[in-house]
Image: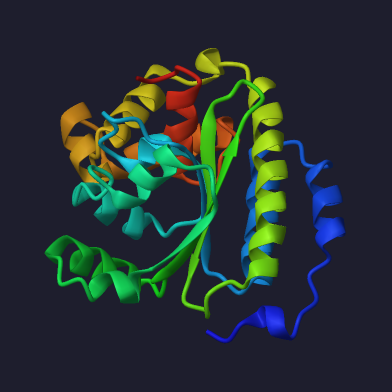
Amino acid sequence: MENERDTRQVDHEGLLKEISTLSTQFDMFRFLKKVTDLFGMRAFMVMRIPGATTQALQTASIISSWPAELLSKFDQAGFIVNSPMVARLRKSTLPFTVDLDQEMQSGDSRALAIFELFNQFRMPRSAFFPVSEPSGERGVVSLFGDRPPLDGQEMLELLMISTHVFDKLHEIGRKDVKPTDALTDREIDCLNWTAAGKTSAEISEILGLSEHTVNHYLNRATRKLDTVNRAQAVAKALRTGIIS
């Protein structure tokens, strides 16, 4: 992909002002999708820094535009465990970039498998911007794509945007009221099994429902939780204590 940044002026101040007007996670999703496009990238993810016992990226993700297939394959392979990227995020608050083309040259089988997965979705390069909430909890805003590496000015602009984004997500999160009463038992069951890594077909067998009904419950739970897809619905349900 050519760097669209070269031919499109980014209104940095305008973007920061826009963040202050956002009121829901869906607003933030659309905003981050726009930022991703403006900087010539393909996908974004905002997540909390995974703990030492975290087994799935899905449980750390707050909001993301990763393809569902990529997230599923990433977690099935257990790539979050002993991840050098996560280890770096735990040790430093400095932004950094990763080029899987270079990582692959190490000859490490794990690095090769990760490269092949991300290259399948044309996302071999990424940039990470560590951030924190007023409470001190740390997170990271990250962008993924196949454009040439971000330059210094872009990194500075994205770091400022990321800081404002994470602070706004914290503000939005504080307004979240546990919508347990709004979710039915079946919807919560389906979210729990989705968090456990089960597909709709597998959940239908476990609960004795049709796959269509399972999809209906999950789609309805996604709307009730004001999220844009199942992965984000599960992340929000975990974060707000609806499921564990």
Which one is nearer the viewer's eye here, 181 or 177? 177
Expressed as whole percent of the image width and height from the top left, the position of residue 131 reads 59, 40
Name the quadrant containing residue 191.
Answer: top left
Q: Which of the 4 image quarters holds residue 2?
A: bottom right
Q: Is residue 241 above or below residue 83?
A: above
User: In the picture provided, is 137 more to the left or to the right than 84?
Assistant: right
Residue 45 in the image, given as x and y percentages of width and height:
50, 51
Q: Position of residue 14 (x, y in %)?
A: 86, 58
Instruction: Find residue 182 and report its image quarter.
Output: top right
- Is residue 93 left or right of 157 when viewed as pictured? left
Tell me if residue 151 comes above or below residue 62 in the rendering: below
Q: At x 28% / y 53%, what residue is drawn?
A: 74
- Measuring 52% from the left and 44% from the top, which residue is drawn there? 140
Evaluate whether residue 4 shows in this view. yes
Residue at 20% x, 71% y is 106
- Residue found at x 19% / y 52%: 77
Depth check: 62 or 94 in front? 94
Residue 103: percent from left, percent from top:
29, 69
- Residue at the outermost top position: 181
| Camera-side residue of 5 and 202 | 5
Judging from the image, the colouring scheme is rainbow
Q: Is residue 28 above or below residue 209?
A: below
Tell me the quadrant of the picture where the C terminus can be found. top left
Q: How many marks?
A: 0
Residue 120 visible in image: no
